[in-house]
Amino acid sequence: MLAYRAGMSTSHGPDESRSREAAAAKEERAGRAGLSFVGEWLLVALLTFIGSLLLVTFPAALAAGVAHLRRHVTGRDTRLALYWRDLGRSLRVLWPAGLVLPALVVVVNLNLLMARSGSLPGAGAVVVATLVLALGVAVVVVRSAAAWSRTTGLRREPSPRFAELSRLAWDRTVADWSGSLLVALAVVGCIGLVYAYRPLVVLVGAVLAVVLLGVEARRARRGI
């Protein structure tokens, strides 16, 4: 009986060893994949920051960043040349969205200045309404960047016109309201990060890109 048990343990030894080696190899691959994603994320942070230095190019730079991260997680080509190609293609479509951002900054600052001076009736309500409206517009602009990256960022197809893209972004913003809430929280969080420590502005594009990537994947899985 003892000999039989010893034989059984010996016979299972190689199988157990192979299973442990397979598990260790799987953990190693997962670790390399995680480190690789962190590296690409940091690269997207730098590329998006450089691409959005003019501010009006931020939506286009963000769209190219989302497309770059999507190519990475799907095992596609992630050459830097493709990012700059996407930046040029998205800029031809998303430049009107880039003009919205400076306009939002001007409107919000004007309302805040008027509220502080006391020359604006119902200043508190106006400021709150302005901030909520500005956040809503920012969410639509950001989601338009994600919509571009998903419709044309992975394929060599003609980019949709800005009117079509903005309508698509609006539809997704309303239909996928929970995803839009996540995007809004990400936007507010990025503003808080930059307000607390200005150099963190370099990470804003990458933070929004990974949030948009997750929100779009969630939306597609839910069939919205």
Image (spheres, grey):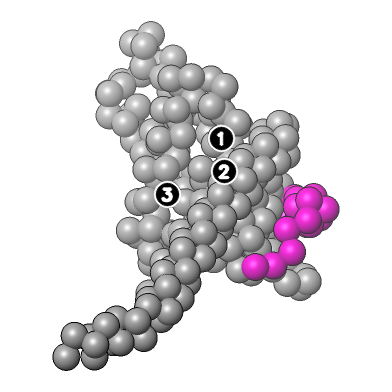
- Tell whether label 1 touches label 2 (CB within 8 Å): yes
Circle 2: residue type: Ala
* Residue ID for mark 3: 183
* Residue ID for mark 2: 206
Q: Earlier in the sequence, mark 3 or mark 2?
A: 3
User: Where are the magenta residues, as a range?
Assistant: 75-93
Residue 202 is inside the magenta segment = no
**147 relative to 124 in the view: left or right:** right
Mark 2 crowdedness (10 Å alpha carbons): few <14, some 14-19, many ≥20: many
Q: Which residue is located at x 54 percent, y 36 percent?
A: 204
Q: Which residue is located at x 65 percent, y 68 percent?
A: 75
The span from disc 1 to disc 3 (Cα, nearest Å) is: 15 Å
Circle 3: residue type: Val
* Image height of 86 relative to 19, above or below: above
Mark 3 crowdedness (10 Å alpha carbons): few <14, some 14-19, many ≥20: many
**Depth check: 206 or 220 in front?**
206
